[in-house]
């Protein structure tokens, strides 16, 4: 199925929450520079998570940055954040400018190729509060991101997350919608995603 195209600031969700797409949050030059920086200087880790009681390696590399003391528990692992680097603060400021929100932490994911992925989930951890605002910034190869209604899984939205784009999720989105980044056979190179969040 072909991905739909959305205009800036148009809600992608038909009801129960808001998801807005900003395709040009960063210029092509900024995005190229930031992708190089992130690949080289972020302290990437390959971690195991608990799934159905078993330890499984995550199909991607991860890192957690944020303000001191804002630890985060996710699929059975508790992560202590590293302090934001100057580059990450610059990206965070852009995300704050575009969304009007403020963030104190960031989960980084590095998808090395189309075999790396993230399965269906909601960003509904207790630390994020009731209606979390999440700004998801992407650099590198374009990947399909899917949202589907938690109760009626036939209601599906596809969004192509391109180099330098920002996706904002807010309101009741994390109650009523789950999202994933499926594997792909398309050869589209490395991709880094940063989700800025607010840990209460
Ligand atoms: O890589 C993406 O676009 C999705 C990342 C995500 O859903 C998450 O970090 O919770
Ligand atoms: Mn997520």
Image: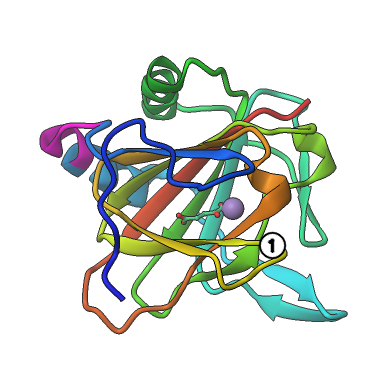
Q: Report x, y in % for residue 33.
A: 19, 38
Colouring mode (rainbow / by chain / secondary structure / one colour): rainbow
Residue depicted at x 19% and y 33%: 30
Residue extending furthest toward the front? 14
Please say if 56 is above or below 40: below
- Residue identifier under label 1: 150
Please say if 5 is above or below 60: above
Residues 147 and 74: in front is: 147
Residue depicted at x 58% and y 23%: 103
In the image, the segment drawn in magenta is 26-31
In the rendered image, which quarter is residue 66 located in?
A: top right
Q: Report x, y in % for residue 94.
A: 36, 21
Count of marks placed on residues? 1
Residues 179 and 119: in front is: 179
Residue extending furthest toward the left? 29
**Along the horizontal axis of the image, is 13 left or right of 176?**
left
151 falls in the magenta region: no
Residue depicted at x 78% and y 25%: 200
The N terminus lies in which quarter of the figure? bottom left
Residue depicted at x 60% and y 31%: 133
């Amino acid at each position: 199925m072909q991905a739909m195209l959305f205009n800036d600031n148009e809600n992608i969700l038909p009801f129960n929450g808001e998801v807005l797409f900003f395709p040009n949050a960063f210029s092509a030059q900024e995005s190229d520079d930031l992708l190089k920086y992130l690949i080289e200087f972020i302290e990437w880790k390959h971690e195991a998570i608990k799934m159905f009681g078993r330890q499984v390696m995550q199909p991607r590399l991860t890192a957690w940055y944020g303000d001191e003391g804002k630890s985060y528990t996710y699929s059975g692992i508790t992560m202590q954040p590293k302090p934001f680097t100057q580059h990450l603060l610059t990206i965070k400021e852009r995300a704050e400018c575009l969304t009007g929100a403020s963030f104190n932490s960031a989960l980084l994911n590095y998808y090395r190729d189309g075999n790396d992925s993230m399965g269906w989930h909601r960003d509904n951890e207790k630390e994020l509060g009731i209606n979390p605002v999440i700004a998801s910034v992407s650099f590198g190869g374009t990947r399909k991101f899917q949202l589907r209604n938690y109760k009626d899984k036939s209601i599906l939205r596809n969004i192509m997350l391109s180099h330098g784009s920002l996706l904002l999720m807010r309101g009741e989105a994390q109650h009523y919608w789950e999202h994933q980044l499926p594997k792909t056979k398309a050869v589209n190179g490395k991709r880094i995603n940063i989700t800025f969040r607010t840990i209460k």
